[in-house]
Amino acid sequence: MEQTNIVKVAGLTRTLLFVVGGILILAACVLGTLILLLPTPFPFDTWWNSVLVQNPIIFLTGFARVMDWIGGGWFGVLVVPILGAIALILLRRPWSAAFFLTAEAASAGAVQIAKHAFGRARPEDIIVIVDYGSFPSGHVANAATLATAAFILFPRLWVLLIGIAYVLLMALSRTALHAHWLSDTIGGALIGAGMVLLIAGAFAPLLVRERRDVRQLSSQ
């Protein structure tokens, strides 16, 4: 019988998954609390927003609008998770699919809780339709959730690098549209990655057992 305390997912033990995930969520809460207490945005927030306002790039704005559609709304919240789960099921990894859907739902729920808890106002130069609350960025949280879950399930360097690039591009797109302050995107990344690690800790024994079973079937 497997010893769950030494089970590793993507090279991380269950304890480490829980600890790191908890630290990331705590960091997001601390950042949100600072935002709530301070009367104005952080200096780096206003600086970055002013850089983008004073130096508009047509290509960047068009790219950001595409990322806005991909990373949020019905497509990002419903289609992406469902397609990802279907792909995992076709790969004979139903527990991975369950983990992915749970992580997506937990991340989305945490974002909405944080948005209503901190109630931060968005930048005045916003050029897209958005929902309530600037902190944290739901789009970046979605991106971080997808990227972190992909690495947990497929721990390869190229998966990690593509995931990091995707999160950074999503963060850039959200600030380019002035939908978020830069610190909002940091909070979104922290919550997205943190929730995935916590859920991965809960699913760790099942994911390890499933991966072993798939390998055995493939070798037959």
Image: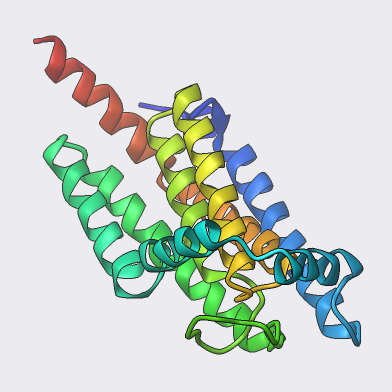
Residue 35 in which image quadrant: bottom right
Horizontal side, residue 72 vs residue 94: left or right: right
- Name the image quarter holding the N terminus: top left
Residue 198 at least partly seen: no
Q: Is residue 102 above or below residue 213?
A: below
| Tally of numbered tags | 0
| Residue found at x 60% / y 76% | 179
- Name the image quarter holding the C terminus: top left
Q: Nearer the viewer, residue 7 or 157?
A: 157
Residue 77 in which image quadrant: bottom left
| Residue found at x 53% / y 31% | 161
Image position, residue 24 (x, y; %)? 69, 54
Image position, residue 5 (x, y; %)? 54, 33
| Residue found at x 64% / y 74% | 178
Residue 150 at least partly seen: yes
| Residue found at x 59% / y 42% | 17
Q: Nearer the viewer, residue 18 or 121?
A: 121
Q: Residue furthest left?
A: 220
Q: Nearer the viewer, residue 145 or 177?
A: 177
Q: Is residue 138 above or below residue 84?
A: below
Q: Residue furthest top?
A: 219
Image position, residue 111 (x, y; %)? 55, 73
Q: Nearer the viewer, residue 21 or 33?
A: 33
Horizontal side, residue 28 vs residue 88: left or right: right
Horizontal side, residue 79 vs residue 178: left or right: left
Image position, residue 73 (x, y; %)? 36, 75
Horizontal side, residue 182 vs residue 126: left or right: right
Q: How is the image coloured?
A: rainbow
